[in-house]
Image (cartoon, helix red, strand yellow):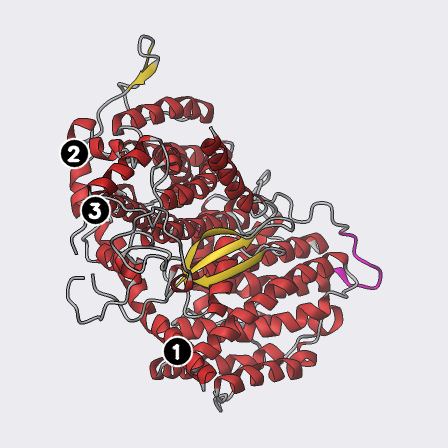
Amino acid sequence: MNDIHIQQDAEDAHDNAYAGLLSNDAHWAFGTDFEDPLAGVDTTIPDGLDAAELAQYCLMLGDDALVYAHRLSEWTSRAPDLEEDIAIANLALDLVGQARLLLARAAAADSSIVPVLPEGSPVPDEDRLAFFREAGDFRNVRLAETPNGDFAELVTRLLVLSTWRLAIFERLVGHPDAVVSAIAAKGVKELAYHRDFAGRWFVTLAGGTSESRRRLTDAMRAVWPLIPELGEGTDTERTVGVDPAAVALEVGVVLDQVLAVGGMTAPDVPGLARVRGRAGRQGMHSEALSRMLAEMQVVARAHPRGRW
Amino acid sequence: MTENQAEWPLYEVFIRSKRGLNHVHVGSLHAPDAELALRHARDVYTRRNEGVSIWVVPSADITASSPQEKDPLFAPSGDKVYRHPTFYDIPSNVPHM
Amino acid sequence: MQVDEAPLEKAFDATIGAGDRIEPRDWMPEKYRQTLIRQVAQHAHSEIIGMQPEGNWITRAPSLRRKAVLLAKVQDEAGHGLYLYSATETLGVSRDELTRRLIEGKQKYSSIFNYPTLTYADVGSIGWLVDGAAICNQVPLCRTSYGPYGRAMIRICKEESFHQRQGYELLMTMMRGTDEQRAMVQESVNRFWWPALMMFGPPDGDSPNTAQSMEWGIKRHTNDELRQRFVDMSVPQAEALGVTFPDPELQWNEERGSYDFGEPDWDEFWQVVKGNGPCNTQRIAHRKAAYDDGAWVREAALAFAAKARADEND
Ligand SMILES: [Fe+2]
Ligand SMILES: [Fe+2]
């Protein structure tokens, strides 16, 4: 009898160890069952904020997240080990979550940007923006859309993108729009983790083997030309958001620090040219984006009245 | 069985899911060092739930008692956490271990 | 070293007989250990290979919510594989060794994952029918005689039940959508029904290891028992969903209190098991590529850790 009790207790304790973990966490498959992404949040636009500009700004930040999440999600079942596979999926999940909130916010702020679907279509606004816009309407930076390279490329690009995004989100926590501020507050924790993951792996690859160091050097040469674009802000960013130029210094310091610990030097490469002054934020993308979208949007577009 | 040089060592993971509870063994994972083991544990076993306390211990560093009085196959007995061959260093040039 | 194993075997049998668990440091018959390794490894491989058919649709998920759900689900499967490989480590076989046995074709995984996923509805069918069949197979394993395996299964089963609900909910939502979506669901269910039934393994008469595994408490029900349970569970679910199963012989048998159903195509089953399924080559090649491509990363991390240790000791 006693033994049975002890065993039962042990099993209860075992269950309890998980009990606390199995609640309230968006990273479990069953924790992603969110319905209206902005439910219960005050979506009135505060006085003095241009709604159309705010919508454009949310598109920029939302598209960066959506497009890079796509690249990260392509790593699923392809990572160097199971532990890394799970970690990368967590990164992608965070960014899909951010994209969903930001696109919903963009649509709520300015309904005129939302693609029109057949009468009675149940497709929610954030999905219309994600799945029914053309490449030229996407506002993400080009670094987010570049096709995946090897693990060194993942680490290097993630380091750069998460460092930038974190610096911007930290400032957006104080944004007058309650929705943007809430999204930023949640995002800061996530992005700090992303940067940490990337920084730690950057240093590991830098100090690992000659091959890992060579691959990291190649990755930096591929990523660095796309960095200047991140700092060239638009009027939209300057009026209703955070001017990326204002965080460039801080970002540079963080990157220098990581590079120094790894004993790496930044490649001396020029920034990728713009096309008649336009780059990602103005809808001028690389060839990779329309191909990515063809894949991302294929099912949704085949069913404009579909319910998922 | 041959050992691949590039396999990361095994760590045992202990989690306290909320204050007031003991850390409980939840499983194991591979990591090159303790720092990454902690990070892996957070991703794998908690999916980054905050407020969870995690311990990681190299499996090879755990001294285990023997559940049975007689433990004749390996001596000294009170050592490894698992009793099977992987956890005993075998030179990689020994074939078919 | 010669050891008299008779008293050890007696203690082992007594532990099993009392319904108690065998734990990693216990003595166990070599055949028990080998059978467990084979079963748990096969299960772990199934989780990992099982990431691919559904992972195939992550980049094409038709809504942001579905994308997140599917990403998290496939991620759970990686976790399941990881927990199960942890259980095999306690039996003295490393994950690395087992991964190599998998990609060299020396160990198997569930044949269901050698079928292709052709539409988004397949994500729903897999959740409902494949994860559902897996639950039928796996819930009894939470009480399996080997402690680490049983503990891994407790956690896995909790997540699998969410997977099944997720899949069913996707299909339910699609059934409330357009005619095309309803047709897509039915077509997908038609394709996955028979392979799902095959997941319980060959008929009992053709399953040579079952008896010994049941005696050892590694397995707790026969293939045919579990298959029947699955059919009985699924038919009312299909009715609620508004889909049919592609089996003209499927009908309620009042006397048995169960559904009668037709024979799966066992010839197809054995073809797929023997490596000739629609996706066997592709699945293994994908897994091998990930393993090979990651080798330099794993090596680099080890080298980095070794240098850090050396620095500490200086
Ligand atoms: Fe699973
Ligand atoms: Fe599952």
Of B80 and A276, which appears nearest the observer? Answer: B80
Q: Are there few (<14), some (14-19), or many (20+) residues within 10 Å of tag 2? A: few
Q: Which residue is mark 1?
A: C306
The mark nearer the N terminus, 2 or 3, is: 3
Q: Which residue is mark 3?
A: C30
Q: Which residue is mark 2?
A: C208
Camera-near label (1 vs 2) is 1
> Which chain does the residue under circle 2 lie in?
C
State the image coordinates of residue B42 (x, y, percent, origin top left). 52, 59
> Which chain does the residue under circle 1 lie in?
C
State the image coordinates of residue C113 (x, y, percent, origin top left). 29, 45
Magenta portion: prevailing SS class: loop
Q: Is residue C10 left or right of residue C56?
A: left
Q: Is residue A46 magenta?
A: yes
**Separation (CA) of disc 1 from disc 2:** 47 Å
**Separation (CA) of disc 2 from disc 3:** 18 Å
> Which chain does the residue under circle 3 lie in?
C
Of C97 and C212, which appears nearest the observer? Answer: C212
Q: Quadrant of the C terminus of chain B?
A: bottom left
Camera-near label (2 vs 3) is 3
Start-end of magenta stretch: A43-51
Question: What SS does tag 3 mark?
Answer: helix
Would you say the beta carbon of the disc 3 residue lies within 8 angstroms of ligand 1? no
Residue B91 picture quarter: bottom left
- Can residue C120 be seen here? The reply is no
Q: Which residue is found at the position 54% from the left and 48% from the top?
A: C65
Decide: is A268 above or below C15. Answer: below
Q: Amino acid at mark 2?
A: Pro
Q: Amino acid at mark 3?
A: Glu
